[in-house]
Image: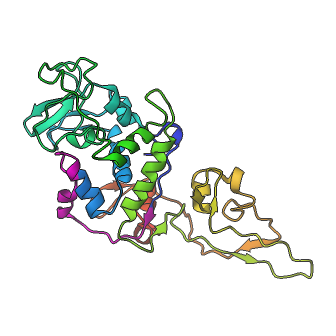
Amino acid sequence: IRASSPGNALDLPLRWGRTDRESCPESASRLPEPHGCSEVEGAFLNRMGLTWTDATALMGAHTLGRGSLQFSGHDGTWVDSGDESAIFDKRFYEEIFRRAWRPRQTEVGVDWTWGGNNRDFMMLNTDICLVYDIPDGDDQTCCTDITQDCRDATVQNVQCPFADQVRPEAHAAVNTFLGGGLNSNDNAPFFEGFAAAWEKATENGHTGLLDVGSSCFPTLSPVPTPSSGAPSPVSCSDVTSFFDNDGKLRDCDWVVSAGKCGKFGQDECPVSCNNCASDSVSTAPTLSLGACQDVSSFLDPNGILRDCSWVIRKGKCDKFGLN
């Protein structure tokens, strides 16, 4: 997601330590069905303990990718082009307001589209209901913007009412995530909301999770050089965590992975950024491992091709970190 966000601006928190499972067959039934906002409420609020703001932020992930006839039966992108569907930004929310969405019957139930019959764009009830007060299910009889051409005479004069009275928090969140309007390039409100919701959702029910390190090998603590009678230098050590200029809590693993040593390598993370004076600390001796380097790729026990970034991201250093 970071790589697909404009300017790599969205840096999601990811911590490891969950128990692995080879399969989770019951997980599919936990996802919200596309029938309407009662499904969103059941999955995100009632079962996961999130808020409508969190749920609305997570639904914004529909800005990426597309629906498929093969999997859901609903075909199309949520945004207005294939190129845009590869960018993680606030366009999903813009599209809800920008188009005259009308209901469309499919083999698996109703979804929403706009423009001509061959338009490859769609929204689900679970998307439209964040802004408009529509019922659950297939009985949809309105258009989201009758000032435009809805391309369906049966709904052309039937305006979908706003959901600001029935789902005020969700409606307000969409307007917040617009970042100042349809023509604004400000993704910050959405990114902040999505990161907060992501952290809650991915860490829900877990304690003691650990930050992903920048290496599979443990970080060795600096050991003071024996005293030679000269005055002792100031201790050179990393801080546990700190707030960056945007008020976000960071640590030294983030500084190294984000390439921020030039900014935070002197005061916050001198050890991690190799800025400690050689006469003030020395690193503990390390074991000789011969030619110690990562492989470019390998096959896991299931025959799936992996690389070392996957090992770190999945917290698999205990399994693949030595070889």
Where is residue 253? Give x, y as percent. 58, 61
Q: Can residue 124 be seen in this snapshot?
A: yes
Quadrant in the picture for residue 302 = bottom left
Q: Quadrant of residue 285?
A: bottom right
Quadrant where the C terminus sits is bottom left
Q: Would residue 115 be found to the left or right of residue 170 on screen?
A: left
In the displayed structure, does residue 147 sit left or right of residue 281? Answer: left
Q: Is residue 89 visible?
A: no
Front residue (pair 167, 177):
167
The structure residue drawn at horizontal position 18% and vertical position 30%, both measured from the top left corner, is: 142
Above or below: residue 269 compared with residue 94: below
Q: Along the horizontal axis of the image, is 85 left or right of 104? A: right
Asked whether 148 falls inside the magenta stretch, the response is: no
**Which of the 4 quarters of the picture holds residue 27?**
bottom left
Q: Is residue 31 magenta?
A: yes
> Where does the magenta region start and end?
15-39
Callout count:
0
Identify the colour scheme used.
Answer: rainbow
Q: Residue at x 46, y 26 (%)?
A: 183
Q: Position of residue 282 (x, y in %)?
A: 74, 72
The residue lying furthest to the right in this view is: 230
Task: Give coordinates of residue 258: x percent, y percent.
Answer: 58, 51
Instruction: Between residue 243 and residue 143, name the one nearer to us.
Output: 143
Q: Closest to the observer: 128 or 75?
A: 128
- Using the image as rendered, state which of residue 11 and residue 140 is in the foreground: 140
Q: Residue at x 46, y 61 (%)?
A: 312
Q: Residue furthest front?
A: 165
In the picture, the quarter occupied by the N terminus is: top left
Identify the residue at the far left of this view: 107
Where is residue 24? Give x, y as percent: 21, 64
Relative to 315, is 7 above or below? above
Q: In the image, is residue 263 above or below residue 65? A: below
